[in-house]
Image: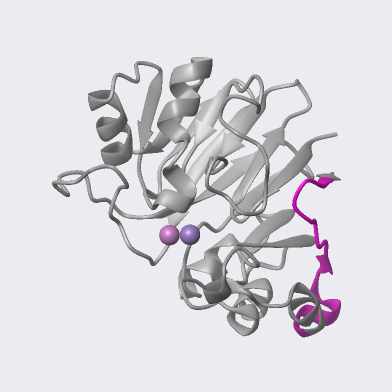
Amino acid sequence: MARIDYVGHATFFLTTDDGTRIAVDPFYDENPLTDLTVESVGHVDYVFVTHGHFDHFADAIPLARRTGATLVGTFEIVSFAQTKGIENAHPMHIGGSWRFPFGRVKLTPAIHGGSVAGDDAGAYSTFPAGLLFDLGDGQRVYDAGDTALTMDMQLLRGQVDVALLPIGDNFTMGPEDAARAVEFIEPKVVVPIHYGTWPFVDTDPDAFARLVGERARVEIVRPGESFEF
Ligand code: NI
Ligand code: MN
């Protein structure tokens, strides 16, 4: 079994069958939905980031530094991290995939802002991404990242078992567009994320579940809870 431990907002850990622990969009210390900190999250093998905004990237460099985990993201984000002394890093870019020891990962397009928190000169602005983890049959996980609804999501049909979709509206898809994304992608299971953190993203996951209806199983995983698949 693989497992998602949902921290809250867009932050979670993905633990694979072989015990690899992956931190996605690490945002702990300033995250209102968790008491976890960079110091308390324990061992991780990889740190994946979808984009450079602080609510996804704030703790990526400190976590990679503390654990020695390999930091993975777009070329620009990884280049920025390397200027901060991160040595274990793997640059990728939109549309590309790579076979890691635990499975294959592809970066997918996301429509969103590209600035990188901490890069005050703006030299490392980049394209935001989604993440498509292929951990094996029945364990294909798509994290859309922060994005609008896109026609490109139709290309993912038949490739996703578990989809993590932002529903918070304002900065990303809201519940209605995320439900349309479910129509496009046809995942077996959908987990709403990126909501309930602040007033700007305070949407209702139960309303999202009603909009999805019978199209997929909606798993509302609360911060601190886990989901196995
Ligand atoms: Ni963002
Ligand atoms: Mn965000």
Q: Let me know if residue 135 appears in the view.
A: no
Asked if residue 72 lies left or right of residue 20, the reply is: left
The foreground one among 127 and 64 is 64
Where residue 19 sits, quadrant-wise, is top right
x, y percent for residue 171: 46, 72
Residue 68 appears anywhere in the view = yes
Apparent side of residue 42 relative to residue 31 in the rendered image (left or right): right
Q: How is the image coloured?
A: one colour
Q: Residue at x 79, y 38 (%)?
A: 3
Task: Locate residue 81 relative to residue 199 in the image: left or right.
Answer: left
Q: Which x, y percent locates residue 126?
A: 27, 51
Above or below residue 188? Residue 202 is below
Q: How many marks?
A: 0
| Quadrant (top left/top right/bottom left/bottom right) for the N terminus | top right
Relative to 65, is 8 on the left or the right? right
Residue at the image position 50 percent from the left and 37 percent from the top: 48
Q: Quadrant of the C terminus?
A: top right
Give 84 or 166, whichever is nearer the viewer: 84
The residue under the point 38% across, 65% down is 112
Query: In the rendered view, would you say 65 is above or below 150?
Result: above
Residue 172 image point, x, y percent:
49, 71
User: Which segment is the magenta one?
Assistant: 211-226
x, y percent for residue 110: 43, 62
> In the depicted view, which residue is nearer to us: 111 or 161?
111
Residue 78 is covered by the magenta coloring: no
Which residue is located at x 74 percent, y 78 percent?
208
